[in-house]
Image (cartoon, rainbow, N blue to C red):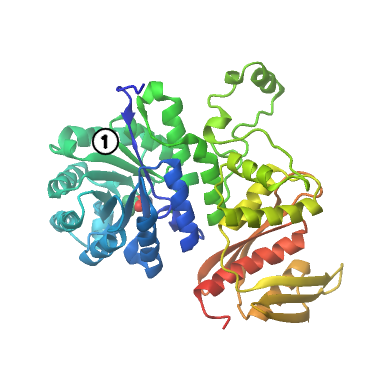
Amino acid sequence: MTDSTIRPIVIFDTTLRDGEQSPGASMNLTEKMEVAQALVELGVDVIEAGFPIASPGDFEAVREIAKSVRGSVVCGLARCRDADIDRAWEAVRCAEQARIHVFLATSAIHREHKLRMDKDEIIRRAVAGVRRAVGYCSDVEFSPEDAVRTETDFLCQVVEAAIDAGATTVNIPDTVGYATPTQMHQVIHMLRQRVPNIDRAVISVHCHNDLGMAVANALAAVQCGAGQVECTINGIGERAGNSSLEEIVMALRTRKDFYRADTRIVSQRLVPTSRLVASVTGIDVQRNKAIVGRNAFAHEAGIHQDGILKEPTTYEIMRPADVGLTKIDLVLGKHSGRAALADRARTLGYRLDAEQLQTVFEQFKILADKKKEVYDGDIASLIEQQIVAVSELWVLDSYSVKTGTQTTPEVQLSLRRGDEVLSTQMTCGDGPIDAIFLAIEDITGIKVQCNDFRVHSVTVGKDAQGEVTVQLKHEGRLFRGRGISTDSVEASAKAFLNAINRIAAVTDDSE
Ligand code: KIV
Ligand code: ZN
């Protein structure tokens, strides 16, 4: 039975918009669609799918998501400008449920230095923007950007005018992550007291994490009556990021007794969604991150382990299974069949269609031949590679490197491009990996700067697979790549090539 004293909180996910603004986190269309589908399964109420005027790619992604999503509102962001709002509507109009989100900065700093507009002009533009959006769509959100640093009288005036113009949600952004929880509480309280038409709109909050207080600030706003929280998976977003969805959701659920509020999020989907977002954005989750970090449910101290064995609630305030963490690390091997793999994938929270399952199964068999025991981490990696696969113009055919101390590596490398095999032989580089990267650049003709290179083992043991991630810079843009193999040099080659294929997909340099 539902408890009528528990307030439902709208979860507005902006992983695909603010989250994508994290440096290096840009996603391609397939990846965005995959994340959008995962957000639907997670049960988010609103998906902010992008900023349609920003680029043709953003527009297309929002439109495709709007066409395919069922069960969540799809929202497009726009400045208070006619062209932005028209474009946002064009992108979301085919959604089952559409929202336009218009924003305009209101703080003195932004008015004077960025917009060069006075207060009257701001109100005039905010009202015009909201009215134009309402002309298209009944679900309109307005954000006074940098609200927390806006003079309180003026903030009340703008919010009242936006609601009068038809905004159904007013979002209070702490754009620069400057607020404290007590202050956030006061701002929401003040708006509820002083804006006469406030009951006609849902109050929302959007908190950035520059001082590490985004989640605390959002929760303080909920405590004071906010009905919507804007957040992102793993807390990604501009600079230090946004409030993390999983932390907001589990804080409300675990401390329902205190907040008297809850969301409709399917919490068992939190860990799989977090893994997916980490994998498509290349932004790893820190080990000690609340809810979804690797250590979030790991108990090290003997006294704690003893307590957990006797009674889990001694040291666990949430059950791992409730956030989608499976504790059984079932080991599969080369004799395991497709049904066992499919079952494991389901338990780990992945949905695979028949074609994806077949590809993952084939890769699993190759891996099981190389490695005696295949763990959950191996399976998750194989699946994630499949889910975020880019169309591969170039495929690694073969390589060999001869190297040693005090010698320049000799590399021989072949890539396949369609039916063609192109090879190169070079003596170059600082080591085997550098030599391979140079050979790939030589064949593909795509020159890059390598900004980041990381390698870690997917599971345990000397035969564990190595996962390599790289971040390459090409013509001012960042591209990531990922490769996995039991041979870490091969994993490096695959990761580099994966990033090169992403570059090739958006440029014609390799022609
Ligand atoms: O941080 C911010 O102010 C924003 C707005 C567009 C809501 O992202
Ligand atoms: Zn933001």
Residue 97 to residue 402: above or below: above
Taking depth in this image into account, of 423 and 364 the one nearest to the observer is 364
Q: Residue at x 18, y 56 (%)?
A: 122
Split into 4 quadrants, where in the image is the N terminus? top left
Q: Nearer the viewer, residue 272 or 472?
A: 272
Taking 508 as reference, is 95 left or right?
A: left
Name the residue type under label 1.
Ile
Label total for image: 1
Residue 360, picture quadrant: bottom right
Task: Provide the residue designation for mark 1.
Answer: 188
In the rendered view, tell whether residue 395 sits above or below residue 102: below
* Residue 23 x %, y %: 49, 59
Q: Residue at x 28, y 61 (%)?
A: 88
Question: Against 486, is 82 above or below?
Answer: below
Q: Quadrant of the C terminus?
A: bottom right
Secondary element type, mark 1: helix
Left/right placement of residue 136 relative to residue 236 reads left
- Residue 500's x, y, as percent? 60, 71
User: Residue at coordinates 26% horizontally, 39% vertically from top-left?
Assistant: 203
Mark 1: few, some, or many residues within 10 Å (few <14, many ≥20)?
A: many
Inspect this view and state whether residue 206 appears: yes
Q: Farthest residue in the top direction?
A: 310
